[in-house]
Amino acid sequence: MGDEGESVDMGQQQMAFDRSDTKTDAAPILCLDQVEVIYPNGTVALQPTTVDFEDGELTVLLGPSGAGKSTLLRTLNLLVRPTSGAVLSREIGTLDATQSIRAHRRDTAMIFQQHQLIGRMGAMHNVLLSRLGRHSFWRTLVGFSEEERRLALECLTRVGLFEKALTRCDSLSGGQQQRVGIARALAQEPKMILADEPVASLDPASSERVLNVLRSICKEDRIPVIVSLHQLDYAKAFADRIIGLAGGQIVFDGPPTQLSETVLTQIYGSTGQDAT
Ligand SMILES: Nc1ncnc2c1ncn2[C@@H]1O[C@H](COP(=O)(O)OP(=O)(O)OP(=O)(O)O)[C@@H](O)[C@H]1O
Ligand SMILES: [Mg+2]
């Protein structure tokens, strides 16, 4: 499922996806099998979609506003439940029962545009909070172990914020806060990272730093990192693979080198206004 040569019927045009130069032999860590999302108000946000994700691959989701990027990302950790179709994890199997979804979410870190940190708490404390999902009730009462504190510091060091460990998050810059968000995601020891427009509110230098950090994690830890972006330049610079969405449908799936003007028109329409 979801192998090379997937095709999407684009009206008159039939488009074949060639991912042969980016795919590895490893089994995909996560697959969507004919996943469709229709919200309760009747909006078809994702048409039946089959796609898979592999370890160590940085995928960027591109597409105009409303294309379905957030919906696709959220189906990957079941924050949005498919109306039909299935989400399959290599380690857990079909993600349908509460227990399997909970286990999958523990292994899947999500980074948002708004950092969702607790401003009055220090960076390290915010990072440690991600460990609560792995604590038993009794451990939560006792507090964090020495080992967890060491892990939190290591995570802050990886995002270049060791010296800010004790600084309150509300006195950090937007880019630093986003990196605390990434450190918090790392402390979850995830097997996959999802990031929904993680650089939408950052200046170019901070954006590049954040994307560099995400790319390093993807490569060093050999985990899939899936990021939605509005900036085409960043997508081309940082992605191994780009998934282009339009109208709740994947209209392109391939390496940045195959992102031609024709493909961009398929994603963004003739104006290409979103492709900044
Ligand atoms: N909770 C919801 N209930 C109903 N419709 C929704 C809901 N969330 C999203 N939608 C609709 O689903 C479609 C896809 O939305 P989605 O948020 O996935 O797009 P997106 O590509 O992330 O857009 P953006 O770039 O603006 O973040 C849109 O038409 C949107 O209005
Ligand atoms: Mg979105």
Image (tube, helix red, strand yellow):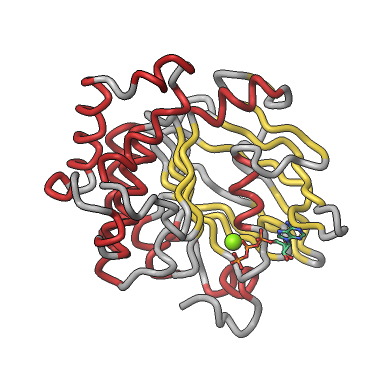
What residue appears at the point 34 percent right and 42 percent down from the top-left corner?
126
Q: Nearer the viewer, residue 103 or 19?
A: 103
As drawn, 265 above or below 88: below
Determine the residue positioned at 50% across, 28% down: 106
Describe residue 55's horizontal placement relative to residue 203 as left or right.
Answer: right
Q: Quadrant of residue 209?
A: bottom left
Q: Is residue 247 left or right of residue 113?
A: right
Residue drawn at 78 percent across, 46 percent down: 36
Residue, far front:
141
Residue 178: image x %, image y %? 34, 56
Which residue in the rendered view is the most extreme toward the right? 42
Give percent across and percent down for residue 269.
Answer: 65, 77
Mark count? 0
Given residues 8 and 221, the one toward you in this image is: 221
Relative to 20, is 206 above or below?
below
Left or right: 35 in relation to 111: right
The residue at 31%/73% (across/down) is: 203
143 is higher (above) or lower (below) than 180: above
Q: Is residue 45 above or below residue 260?
A: above
Residue 223 x, y percent position in the rendering: 40, 34
Q: Nearer the viewer, residue 32 or 261?
A: 32
